[in-house]
Image (tube, helix red, strand yellow):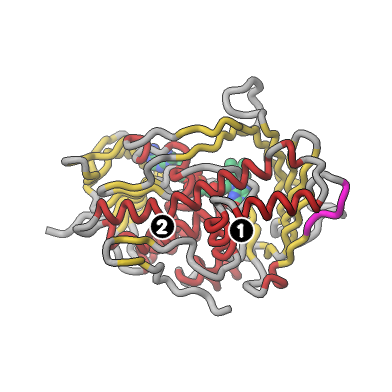
Amino acid sequence: MTRPPVVVAGGGLAGAAFAACLAVRGTPVTVLERTAVPGAGEAEALAPGVHAVLSGLGLSGRVHEAGFARGEVSVLGWGNGEEPWRSAFAETGGIDHGYHVCLGALVELLLQRAGECGARVVRGAEVIEPVTDGGRVTGVVVHTAGQTETLPARLVADATGTARVVAGRFCAAEPDPLSHRVFRAVAPADATTEQGAFVLEGAPGEWHWRIPLAGGVVGLGRLVPGGGGDAGGDDGERWRGYRCARLAGAGWLSVGDAAGLADPAFLDPATVALLAAQAAASAVPVLCGDEAEEAARGYMDCYAPVVECARAFAAFCLDPARHGENTETLLRGFTAFAAGEHGGALARIRAALAGHRPLFDVEYPLGPLVASLAMPER
Ligand SMILES: Cc1cc2nc3c(=O)[nH]c(=O)nc-3n(C[C@H](O)[C@H](O)[C@H](O)COP(=O)(O)OP(=O)(O)OC[C@H]3O[C@@H](n4cnc5c(N)ncnc54)[C@H](O)[C@@H]3O)c2cc1C
């Protein structure tokens, strides 16, 4: 009898990358994506660490051909009247650019690559719930084209974002006390647009960002802390971060926003989702093996600090107390954060975002499992 495939619930950024990473290694994988038609997606800035995933998938050339805009500089203004902080990737001694993309185009590229390598990608397929046997996830119930069926799986990856259709059965998300409202738009570039620069700026009571895209347009965003969650008003996207006490178990794992949500602006969540998907794909052999419970614990031990750090960092940066602080005070705060409980994870995330190392290696009973996809030349 042939072994069932790894099933990926959700074909967004994390699910598409996870599936492609498995497919290029010849692992049978099925992606179940609820939406029937690919969406254009929003403008997002991807850090240089994205090259580690793209090159491992053999997609570097195609991304270049697709003409995604290069992201070369990150500009962070604190709304304190001082010069914004500028960080040119070329000056960090690593890879000199990331990309500014319409998310949908990148997701399609990843799904296409997964399909080329043998993955089955099913659109219009809504995962309803996991199927369990003796506490182990053995498949999913899926609704496709008016029919509901059970699909067996050797492992189920929950990449359904905030829906958490599989992970939610094993642990509820714990929402952050703070919530936001996010507004996004695309506009023609103008004289103030600095090509290649992701600009994030604090203003009284809100944050703004600009992501110059290819084709002379800019993705604009506005985040209003305290304006989301269940608060009044119905415009914009509601945003409330959360943490999850469990990120994996026997027969399942979660990756991307399904594993935890911080904020859209700080610490490059989309790149973190891609890098986590790459590391998670490396963990699949042990997660499917005899030591599945142990491997699941190892996966959580490695991934949870990343999620926790992202949430703590977002809380630190979005704290209204930051607004108007001068550079000296801000730097003191950052130094204290980096020396605190999340310092190790922060250093690791930043190294991964710069393309210097994998986001995490999975510890399991036989030792660390190092992400084995090729890292780019530096
Ligand atoms: C306003 C905003 C701005 C952002 N800007 C940036 C940025 O500039 N830079 C950055 O790094 N990050 C940014 N992010 C964050 C980034 O978009 C996310 O972290 C990333 O896209 C998460 O990907 P994901 O695949 O985990 O989740 P999602 O993108 O949410 O994908 C989940 C997928 O699962 C599917 N799905 C859901 N339920 C089911 C089901 N039951 N069955 C089957 N499929 C299902 C959905 O249709 C979707 O395709 C932003 C996010 C937001 C909201």
Alpha carbons under labels 1 and 2: distance apart: 17 Å
Is 179 left or right of 8, judged from the image as shown?
A: right
Label 2 sits on residue:
18
| Label at residue 314 | none
Q: Quadrant of residue 60?
A: bottom right
Q: In which quadrant of the rendered image does the N terminus lie?
A: bottom left
For the point 63% across and 73% down, the residue is 94
List the residue tagged with mark 1. 46
- State the residue in front, 201 or 367: 367
Q: Residue furthest left?
A: 1
Q: Position of residue 41 (x, y in %)?
A: 58, 47
Q: Main secondary structure of the magenta part?
A: loop
Q: Amino acid at mark 1?
A: Leu
**Residue farthest to the top, as pictured:** 232
Asked if 30 appears above or below 202 in the picture, the reply is below
In this view, 218 is above or below 360:
above
Residue at the location (75% across, 46% down)?
A: 187
Specify the quadrant of the image occupied by residue 374: bottom left
Could you tell me residue 125's position as x and y percent? 36, 42
Vertical side of 205 occupied by 266: above or below? below
Circles 1 and 2, Cβ within 8 Å, touching? The answer is no
Q: Tell whether 73 sits left or right of 340.
A: right
Q: Which residues are magenta?
A: 81-85
- The spot of residue 171 in percent (x, y) is 36, 36
